[in-house]
Image (cartoon, grey):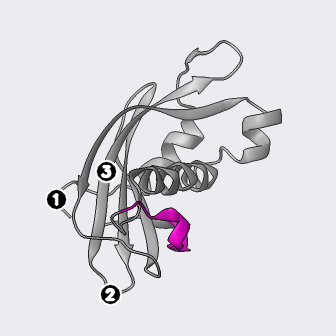
Amino acid sequence: MAYIETYRAVVAPSDCDHLGHMNVSGYFQACSDAVIAFQAQLGLTPADVLKGRKLSFAVVRAESDFKSEVTAGDVLTMHTGLVEVGTKSAIFRHRLVKSDGSVAFETLFRCVLLDLVARRAAVIPDEVRTAATSLWWPPED
C-alpha cells in the first residue's frame, strides 16, 4: 500500500453542525485540500497550476462512506493514494483517520486532468503518470 499524508487538522467547534458532528462540508473541504497536496506530489504544484502548465485535477465523481463520528477536538489525518490512472483521468482514494487510528471517512474521487485554459480534459503527462503510479493504493487495503 502506498499513500501519503495530505492533510492534518483539529476539528473546531465551528466545523460542526447543530448535532455536534463535523458538517459534511468539512469532509469535502479536507478532501479538496488533500487533492492540492496530492497533485503537488505528482508534479502539479500550485505555481505550475496557476502560472505554468495550467493543468489541475478536477473531481467529476465522488463515492463516499462515512464510517465513524467526527466531533470538535478530534485530530484528523488524510491519507491519499491512487487507485487507477487512465489517459485523461485518475481515481484518488482519500481516507480520513482519527488519532485513535479509526477510519472516519473514505472516498474515491474520479478526477479528470483539466486544461485550465481550454477548459477541457487533457492527457496526463508521462512524468505525472509515473509519479502517480508510485502512489498506487489497491482498493482492497
The amino acid type of the residue labelled 1 equals: Glu
Front in this rendered view, residue 20 or 69: 20
Q: Earlier in the sequence, mark 3 or mark 1?
A: 3
Give the side of residue 35 with respect to residue 89, left or right.
Answer: right
The spot of residue 131 in percent (x, y) is: 52, 50
Q: Quadrant of residue 61?
A: top left
The spot of residue 96 in percent (x, y) is: 37, 66
Q: Secondary structure at mark 3?
A: strand
- Tell me what residue is drawn at x 39 percent, y 84 percent: 99
User: What distance separates the C-alpha of mark 3 from that of mark 1?
Assistant: 13 Å
Q: Which residue is mark 1?
A: 140
User: What distance separates the C-alpha of mark 3 from that of mark 2?
Assistant: 20 Å
The spot of residue 57 in percent (x, y) is: 54, 35
Between marks 1 and 2 in the image, the one whose residue lies nearer the viewer: 2
Q: Secondary structure at mark 2?
A: loop
Give the side of residue 65 with respect to residue 98, left or right.
Answer: left
Please give the range of residues in magenta. 6-18
The amino acid type of the residue labelled 2 equals: Asp
Q: Residues within 10 Å of mark 2 (few under 14, many from 20)?
A: few
